[in-house]
Image (cartoon, rainbow, N blue to C red):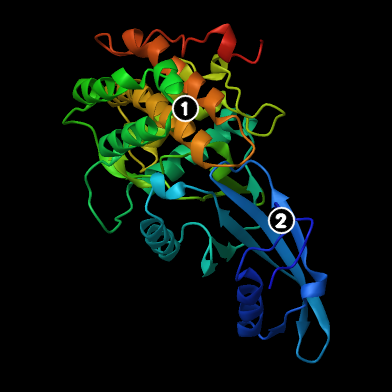
Amino acid sequence: MAVKTNGFVGGIWPEGLMQLLASLASSWGEVFDHEGLKVLHLSGAMTNVVYRVSWPIKKGDGDGDGARTVLVRVYGKGLDLFFNREEEIRTFECLSEHGYGPRLLGQFTGGRVEDFIYARTLSSADLRDPETAALIAAKMRDFHELEMPGPKEPLLWNRLRTWISEAKNLCSPEHAKEYQLHILEQEINQLEEAISMDHQKIGFCHNDMQYGNIMIDDNDSTLTIIDYEYASYNPVAYDIANHFCEMAANYHTDTPHILDYTKYPDVEERKRFIRKYLSSSGNEASETAVDELADDVERYTLANHIFWGLWGLISAYVNHIEFDYKEYARQRLEQYWLRKAAILKVGGDGDGHGHGHSKDSSTDM
């Protein structure tokens, strides 16, 4: 049944969603009132389109009893280029069993329904709050320690090679030249050799720890990590690097694609986070361990810039969410070239100056 609503992008309900919601309501002993449905588009998502869907609860005796609210996730187009959806669902279900994130309530054509989490999504400013940052560091450490099914080898490098091939297939010759795809593959190979080291810990990584994927219950400061599309085993230094890089972004502005690398955390802030991460198990981390992980994290920012640069470039061709993917990709790859020499020098990037930026990638333009 195609039901028009102002809430869904395009004004049409996704196929099978209405039937699924009615079935869920029936399983909960409720009468499904489609006339009382309320749909709210939640902004900030760039991979999927996410909605809060509510309806009045009516028991069989006709008495009203509050409202039922669920989260509806409509998958973005072309996402099979980025990850395997069946594997992502298995990860989602396994993490739910571990007590992470919402429950999967059901699937429909092109999307799924999840429990709605009554918590606040973090803002970009929250990432800089020392108390919140300490909570995130501890939560990441717990996440990395999870035992998940499937291969335990890092997926990062094979994923980058797959994405560079996809980008080459999709891009026009002009874009391929502009984004230097002809040499990025060689850069990936050289970077893997330069920054992969035997001492680096491999763990189950989220790989997309931006503020919009972290929720907090302000009553008890409990954090919930959501959205596991890109989750896989990887060096934990890469996951932390990704989190630091996300501090340059604010996806809830009029220009969500613009990154400001003056906001990248300085060496003191990075080491404070890493110290909390390493010490969250109860044992105080040595300065040697903090310095070593901090150096590894900085090196993995380079892989992270290529990762999301390629993601943005591919998304520009396959995803129709309103976001300037090409400009986002340009800024991420620009950071790779700007920072490569300084970060790969002996001893890592310990100068405390954070990431360089050009006026073109700053919000001061």
At 63% from the left and 63% from the top, the residue drawn is 14
- Of callouts 2 and 1, which one flags the residue occurring earlier in the amino acid sequence? 2
Nearer-the-camera pick, 248 or 266: 248
Note whether 195 is above or below 67 in the view shown.
above
Image-based side of 83 in relation to 73, left or right: left
Q: Position of residue 363 (x, y in %)?
A: 65, 16
Q: Position of residue 257 (x, y in %)?
A: 60, 27
In the image as oriented, which residue stretches furthest toward the left? 198
Q: Which residue is mark 2?
A: 8
Q: Position of residue 218 (x, y in %)?
A: 66, 48
At 36% from the left and 11% from the top, the residue drawn is 350
At 34% from the left and 26% from the top, the residue drawn is 303
In the image as oriented, which residue stretches furthest toward the bottom? 61
Q: Which residue is mark 1?
A: 244
- Element type at marker 1? helix
Whether residue 138 is visible, yes or no, is yes
Name the amino acid type tagged 2. Phe
Note whether 4 is above or below 32 in the view shown.
above
Whether residue 221 is visible, yes or no, is no
- Element type at marker 2? loop
